[in-house]
């Protein structure tokens, strides 16, 4: 079982996958393996409105049409610690 911290590629510039859609991101673990089935939640800091999606079989996910502004991003998957990115990520 993986017990490491869930590592997300959510706009932090660590890694970016080559993707057809500019609003698509990929979820990976510490070794770089893609993670399907990760629940991603983006909560807008100003309004508290949350949008949720799940990564697909290639670890990719999309949260289209988000309003501009700071978001708190959170990712969870059974067997991993929940990852939360502070309200510094913008669309």
Image (cartoon, grey):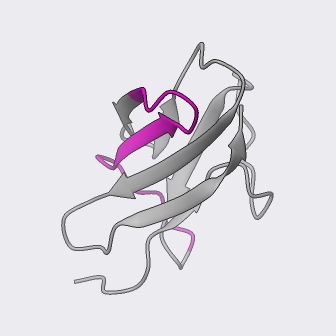
Image quarter of residue 86: bottom right
Q: Position of residue 72 (x, y in %)?
A: 53, 48
Q: How many marks?
A: 0
| Overall secondary structure of the magenta section | loop
Q: Residue furthest right?
A: 13
Image point (76%, 64%), residue name: 14
Residue 8, horizontal then vertical, whole percent: 55, 60
38 or 36, which lies in front? Answer: 38
Residue 85 horizontal/vertical position (percent): 56, 60
Quadrant showing the C terminus: top right
Q: Quadrant of residue 55?
A: top left
Lateral position of residue 77 relative to residue 19, left or right = left
Above or below 19: residue 68: above
Give the position of the N terminus as an image quadrant.
bottom left
Q: Is residue 62 left or right of residue 80?
A: right
Image vertical order of residue 39 relative to residue 49, above or below = below
Which residue is drawn at the image coordinates 40% and 43% (left, top)? 40
Residue visible at 72% across and 49% down? 11
Magenta range = 32-50
Residue 50 falls left or right of residue 62? left
Q: Is residue 42 magenta?
A: yes
């Amino acid at each position: 079982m993986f017990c490491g911290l869930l590592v997300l590629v959510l706009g932090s510039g660590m890694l970016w996958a080559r993707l057809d859609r500019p609003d698509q991101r990929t979820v990976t673990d510490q070794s770089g393996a893609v993670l399907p089935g990760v629940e991603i939640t983006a909560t807008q800091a100003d309004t508290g409105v949350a949008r949720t999606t799940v990564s697909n079989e290639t670890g990719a996910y999309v949260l289209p049409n988000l309003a501009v502004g700071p978001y708190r991003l959170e990712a969870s998957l059974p067997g991993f610690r929940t990852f939360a990115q502070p309200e510094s990520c913008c669309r």
